[in-house]
Image: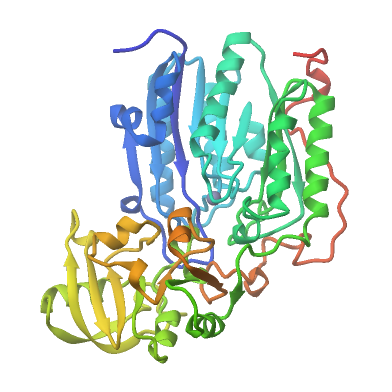
Amino acid sequence: MNKPGPRIAVGGLHIECSSYNPLLTREADFELVTGQALLDSHHFHVLSDYPAQFHPTIYAHALPGGPIEQAAYNKIKADLVHELEKSAPLDGVYLMMHGAAFVDGMEDAEGDLLTAVRDCIGPDVPLSVSYDLHGNVSERVIDAIDMFTAYRTAPHVDVTDTHRRALDQLFRCLDTGQRPSVCWCPIPVALPGERTSTEDQPARDLYQKLPEVSASDGIWDASLMVGYVWVDEPRMTAASVITGLQSGPMEKAARGLAMDYWNARTDFTFGTAIGSIGACLDEAAKPGKSPFVLADSGDNPTGGGVGDRVDALREVLARAFKDVVVAGIADEPATELAFEVGPGASAQFTIGGTLDPETSEPLILDADVVNLVHGASRTDRQAVLSSKGVTIVVTAKRRPFHRLSDFQVLGLKPEEAQVVIVKSGYLVPEIKALAARTMMAISPGVVDQEIQRQPRSRSGQNIFPFADVSFDPIVRWANTDPRALAQPAD
Ligand SMILES: [Zn+2]
């Protein structure tokens, strides 16, 4: 039953794509939520707190990965536009975005998508968006929207708060009749998320300023974008983004936040001890509490990594550890072989490099099959193998192991292991709590933390740390003429 109130369409595109990842993200890789299921989904649970008639469009969500196949993107875009047309007349639109989509053969994916949305709804319907702070904005993105906000924490523990801010802005616009504008200031700094965790300085202090700036006269929201660095396209950049009604305070805030970020650029460091895989294992071998959790960062699927590399497994097998858990390695043939031979049996397995054979060397080893997990479908299959004291999880599809329940479902007790190796950047809170000691391996892969090691032809030309640059903050207003903005306090 529809509630009274404004008619608001909701949806979004939520994916992070590394242009260095050779695996295309296809339609089947997306969770496509539509209709009542969208309104009921946990992503959109905050909607129930707002008095409106919400019209579901499409919410396309996927594990980070490689570029989106063009046909898949075009279908998502067409479906979104079609649903918006069906929902007309609309009073407003809210889209839940990530901001780091990359479509095979096309740059500025969100710019393209949001432009299509604007063309569909026309100039008068206000459009509010929420972003991940690891998204890249662009002139086209800013042109298309009326209100912007982004996560203020990494790891992201303020997802729901961010959705609320985006909706609060939209309702403020509808309730008051005020139409805000957005300005932004690109900051020529490229830093991986692992150097800019808001749990560590200087990001913590920088991000703690945002609520206060957002509460200033004439400003509705202040956001600071770290950007997404594992993509080779011109829009790759950090940025400050301000939504508000008064051009003077907005420009000052955009410039100030940008300068603060720029001035801190050489202070960002990894919030955890780092080293090569070998150096991390040397540390793990020293006497100390366990488990020692090693984050294999270059192949982290939640950052856009492939997830099939065995560099860490190879090195740990060569050492004398006795109780190691490696979770997990995406390898469908190895998983299928484990299901064929069954629990208790042994076989020779070839593990790794099945998704990205160009850059990843497989490992051949004899292993026992310890456990099998069927999952909802064949692609959800997982197998637990054991070889020389090392427990190895192989999975039919790419997936992270970022929750204790991911291990528990396999019958594993990572808390009792000497060493746990996960494919991850900074550890998510649940795994961090598990770790008695931890290090992040600066390991090879398509989301290499040493971002200077990746080739760039479309990005990074005038950006720190790739180039020796100076910074004169220039605030951009895109389509809006700031002189047209209201000057009195709102
Ligand atoms: Zn993020």
Quadrant in the picture for residue 181: top right
Asked whether the viewer can see residue 182, the reply is no
Q: Nearer the viewer, residue 93 or 244?
A: 244
Q: How has the structure been colored for display?
A: rainbow
Q: Quadrant of the N terminus?
A: top left
Query: What residue lies at 57% left-to-right and 74% top-to-bottom?
Result: 442
Query: What residue lies at 36% left-to-right and 61% top-to-bottom?
Result: 399
Residue 330, percent across and down? 33, 69
Instruction: Please give left or right for residue 280 compared with residue 330 in the image.
Output: right
Q: Quadrant of the C terminus?
A: top right
Residue 265 to residue 95: above or below = below
Q: Nearer the viewer, residue 292 or 406?
A: 292
Query: What residue lies at 52% left-to-right and 57% top-to-bottom?
Result: 105
Query: What residue lies at 84% left-to-right and 66% top-to-bottom?
Result: 468
Q: Nearer the viewer, residue 442 or 323?
A: 323
State how many labels appear: 0
Residue 346, percent across and down? 16, 86
Q: Residue farthest to the front?
A: 288
Asked whether the viewer can see residue 187, the reply is yes
Instruction: Please give left or right for residue 452 compared with residue 356 in the image.
Output: right
Residue 14, percent across and down? 46, 44
Residue 37 to residue 257: above or below = above
Quadrant in the picture for residue 130: top right
Instruction: Please give left or right for residue 234 compared with residue 299 in the image.
Output: right
Residue 401 to residue 168: above or below = below
Instruction: Please give left or right for residue 305 compared with residue 226 in the image.
Output: left
Residue 60, percent across and down? 40, 42
